[in-house]
Image: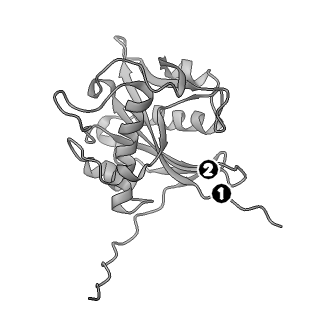
Amino acid sequence: MPKTVAFPRHAASLILWRSRAGGEIEILMGLRHAGHRFMPSRLVFPGGRVDFGDRTAPAATEPLPATLAALERAAPPRLARALAMAAARELEEETGLTLAPPGQAAPALDVLDYVCRAVTPASMSMRFNARFLSAPAEAARGSLAGCGELERIDWFTLEEAAGAPLAPITARVLEQFAACMALPPAQRAARPLICFQGHDRMLPERQSAPARRPASRVG
């Protein structure tokens, strides 16, 4: 009997970054427990799968048009917005930091930038269709704590992160992020978007599908 291929669940991760005094970039990452089924003992970005509540959760601000358009390349509008919300929620749950502006409970989603997408290989029993977003550290507030899912949460330079125990796909996403940050800000939104399929197959992200007219209701 042929092996059943697991369906990749929608997920989002957030690369929170800051600049040192000399301009060197640091990113926030955490080490997953050795007992986890997915990527044990690996340094990862805060992230996880989209929850049903992410589709309707309130936000202080909505994603920027460029970020939303990038997310909608491979997701309908409601899911695209939920992916942005999931990235903000996972950051708070796993690190204790929130994107909510002072005095507000809902996160600001207009601080998010799109990096890339990656789909777990079909050979794996647990699969994700993950979107990677980024945000500057000054958009977050709070103290590093989290829910305990990550053993160690700390700031790493890009060089330190590249030399850490990373999953191959995390290393590729890190390369994409570094390449994006090396561009002038005005060019980042115009760069070609890519999607990793499998372990290291890099493909151009597909174009947005034409909007469909809603079906008429009967009764």
| Viewer-proximal residue among 46 and 68 | 46
125 lies left or right of 28: right
User: Which residue is disc 1 drawn over?
Assistant: 6
Q: Is residue 45 above or below residue 117?
A: above
Residue 166 in the image: x percent, y percent? 62, 29
Amino acid, disc 1: Ala
Q: Nearer the viewer, residue 35 or 209?
A: 35
Give the left or right position of residue 29, taking residue 202 as reference: left
Residue farthest to the top? 21
In the image, is residue 73 above or below residue 118? below
Q: Which residue is located at x 34 percent, y 61 percent?
A: 77
Question: Looking at this rendering, what residue extends furthest in the front direction?
Answer: 219
Q: Is residue 102 left or right of residue 124?
A: left
As displayed, is residue 71 above or below residue 28? below
Q: Residue furthest right?
A: 1
What sort of colour scheme is used for the picture?
one colour
Q: Is residue 90 above or below residue 26?
A: below
The residue where tag 2 is placed is: 127
